[in-house]
Image (tube, rainbow, N blue to C red):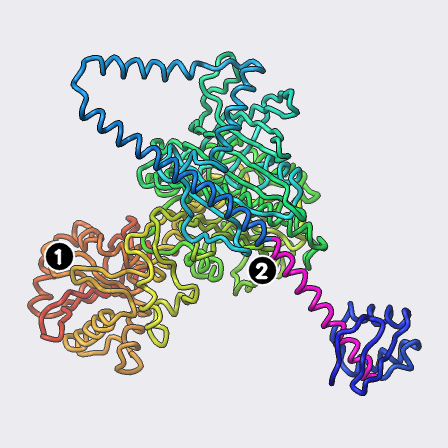
Amino acid sequence: MAMSCKDSKGVMMENGKYVRYTPEQVEALERVYHECPKPSSVRRQQLIRECPILSNIEPKQIKVWFQNRRCREKQRKEASRLQTVNRKLTAMNKLLMEENDRLQKQVSHLVYENGCFRQHTQNTALATKDTSCESVVTNGQHRLTSQNPPRDASPAGLLSIAEETLTEFLSKATGTAIEWVQMPGMKPGPDSIGIVAISHGCTGVAARACGLVALDPSRVVEILKDRTSWFRDCRAVEILNVLPTANGGTIEILYMQLYAPTTLATARDFLLLRYTSVTEDGSLVVCERSLTNIQNGPSIPSVPNFVRAEMLPSGYLIRPCEGGGSIIHIVDHMNLEAWSVPEVLRPLYESSTVLAQKTTMMALRQLRQIALEVSQSGAPNNWGRRPAALRALSQRLSRGFNEALNGFTDEGWSLMANDGVDDVTILVNSSPEKIMGLNLPFASGYPSVNNVVLCAKASMLLQNVPPALLLRFLREHRSEWADDNINAYSASAVKLGPCSLPGARVGNFGGQVILPLAHTIEHEELLEVIKMEGIGNCPEDALIPRDMFLLQLCNGMDENAAGMSAELIFAPIDASFVDDAPLLPSGFRIIPLDPTKDGSSPNRTLDLASALEIGGSGNKVSSDRNVASSTARSLMTLAFEFACESHMQDTVAVIARQYVRTIISSVQRVASALSPNMNLSGGLLAPLGTPEAHILARWISHSYSCYLGAELFKSGGERSENVLKSLWSHSDAIMCCSIKALPVFTFANQAGLDMLETTLVALQDISFEKILDEHGRKGLLTEFAQIMQQGFACLEGGVCSSSMGRPVSYERAVAWKVLNEEENAHCVCFMFINWSFV
């Protein structure tokens, strides 16, 4: 059919006849098009029957009209897209030209400094030694000190500081005050967030970004100044004083608090001067700096649980863009006092890349997200939530998790005594209405008996596990780490009320369904509702729902983002999903501590069974184990909140502590399976799926048959994949230890790891005698001698200990010598039958 995209009033048919439509006919066709852009032949015939004004139009003509209408719509969208891309390219080209000019100035400046340095070096070499040099240095230091006397807090003095801050900020944003280098992995382009750079060789850490957003400059200033709305690490910003200036600007004195990202660090606070003004070319500027060395000025003494940090001249330069929108320059420059944190965390406080990701780029993302929402219709999604409401929900989740993680005393948190082990910290809050932002005693229409909130939190170090990959697994495979046997957390899914006590029987959950709510334009952040499908609930209790719902926030799932932290935060909700419902956020935060050169493959399997089994996926797992650096470390911090009655808080604290310890053990097991590099030296077992693992499994099975005259298990065939799979999933605890004077474990199957409460990675740090009591240690030499002489030994039942010190009873045990291909003793294998925790 030969046709062209004519206007909506007519269409050219294949016979050359031109059909013209009346305005009424066009209006009727447009109504149908908005409902169904591609109607079927039946629908087109029905349209002709139902609309008398279309009765004289043939179905073929109707079909051609819809084809042309779809063509015009496609052309319009493509033209709009090209215009947007062209505008972005124009703005980006302007930014790149400015960057090129800045770099040329920086090169000229460096060349000049290099020449001066050479001249100074030559003069120093020719000059004779003179005692006056000492006085010159002293005088120079004196002059340097006299140039920065204590400032006056009068309006004129504050204005002087503000103007100086403005000059220094502009020299960083568009000048050569700081040597900027392109941030790794951030290449400028029409679809990128902007031009992102980090500092090289300056005091503190600094980051800079330039970008284009489709918002007016005044709206941009309004958003950026409301730091708590987009900066998730910002706890509060309090305006202490406001002073207007003669040039139409505004000087503000601010006090700002930032959350600590983990339980191992302390939160930061700042005393700031913020200066808002308009430059001669009409650009808006908001610049800030810490107020130090001020006489008779605002003073905030050190606050408990906070370390006073310094913000060097930073801020935002917003310029109107031709054709609409704004070009934004952002500079963040801070000294976060890295000396005050443990050495393992100092990379977080000394990295400009971390600052760029957490602060600078977050501001640009917020602006771009709001601009996208403004450009769209703003219609609610299928859950009835508009974008602004969804952003508020994600903000509540993030803020609640940070509050629980930090446990500030002014929010009502206090520390509970531990049980002798410091691995899990328990906090109690007797004023939960503060942290949840509502009046709980009358929430949901009836008095609530839950007047206490407990938080169990802990941190642990992970080796060689990409944070994004682990986050994706935790998100998609909740059953692999959540413990259904402990109902403390499951119970909090019930609506806050009489039956939300931890320990109430809620039932198990058979699976999860992820229902997306919203995501940011870069898919950096996802907000979801998780429906946990319940099984085995008590039908006689109407207050206990069959299904459990979680509101979940996850970010940092980009595996290619260098040094990006990952978060999974969730809170139980009921089916009504009310916006102001109380939230008790819990979750995980995984922070990389070492830079990684290569990201992990985005196509790696997230099935833990596939990671542990061999079969068809063994080669894939093995090949993926080489993608990450062998020295990559990350810190996982987790926090879980529980609501309960005040008289039950001691009981619930015990349950919460054990629940978190169980999760830690599960996460360690998952991390071991997902770790790209688990090669152990010194004859220890290589990761499952490698040839060494197959060989050892075959040795264990063959040696058991030789010495005990029976099959260890039915492997389903002689293939090494089946042998290793059967060994790994055997119900009894099987573990190997080295043949040394002080034997250490080198391998354990899944039951063995559960019995020892450890992981494959940490297994090598456990000695055999550590799990035995005094009686067992005394008989160890005799047992080993019998095993080495006879080849096997049958041991009576008894009690041993896990790596966590928990007593473990077993009905009986069998030990045998494992021989290699040359019939030499490789290790000793133990099998503990019918074991259980006492």
**Residue stretch rendered in magenta on the structure:** 59-87
Which of these two is toward me, 262 or 52?
A: 52
Residue 363 in the image: x percent, y percent? 55, 43
Residue 762 in the image: x percent, y percent? 27, 54
Query: What residue occupies the far right of the structure in this picture?
Result: 52
Can see residue 413?
no
**Element type where label 2 sits in the image:** strand
Quarter placement of the C terminus: bottom left
* Residue at (32, 16) in percent of width and height: 141
Amino acid identity at mark 1: Leu
Quadrant of res 694: bottom left
Compared with 38, 80 (above or below) is above
Amino acid identity at mark 2: Lys
Quadrant of res 626: bottom left
- For residue 531, the mark is 2
Q: Earlier in the sequence, mark 1 or mark 2?
A: 2
Q: Which SS does the magenta portion mostly show?
A: helix
Compared with 430, 358 (above or below) is below
Within-10-Å neighbours for mark 1: few <14, some 14–19, many 20+: some
Q: Nearer the viewer, mark 1 or mark 2?
A: 2
**Element type where label 1 sits in the image:** helix
How far is mark 1 from mark 2, CA to CA? Answer: 51 Å
Which of these two is toward me, 732 or 34?
A: 34
Is 405 situated left or right of 16 in this image? Answer: left
Residue 760 in the image: x percent, y percent? 28, 59
Q: Is residue 437 inside the magenta stretch? A: no
Residue where numbered disc 1 is placed: 780
Compared with 540, 117 (above or below) is above
Count of labels in the image = 2
Compared with 454, 190 (above or below) is below
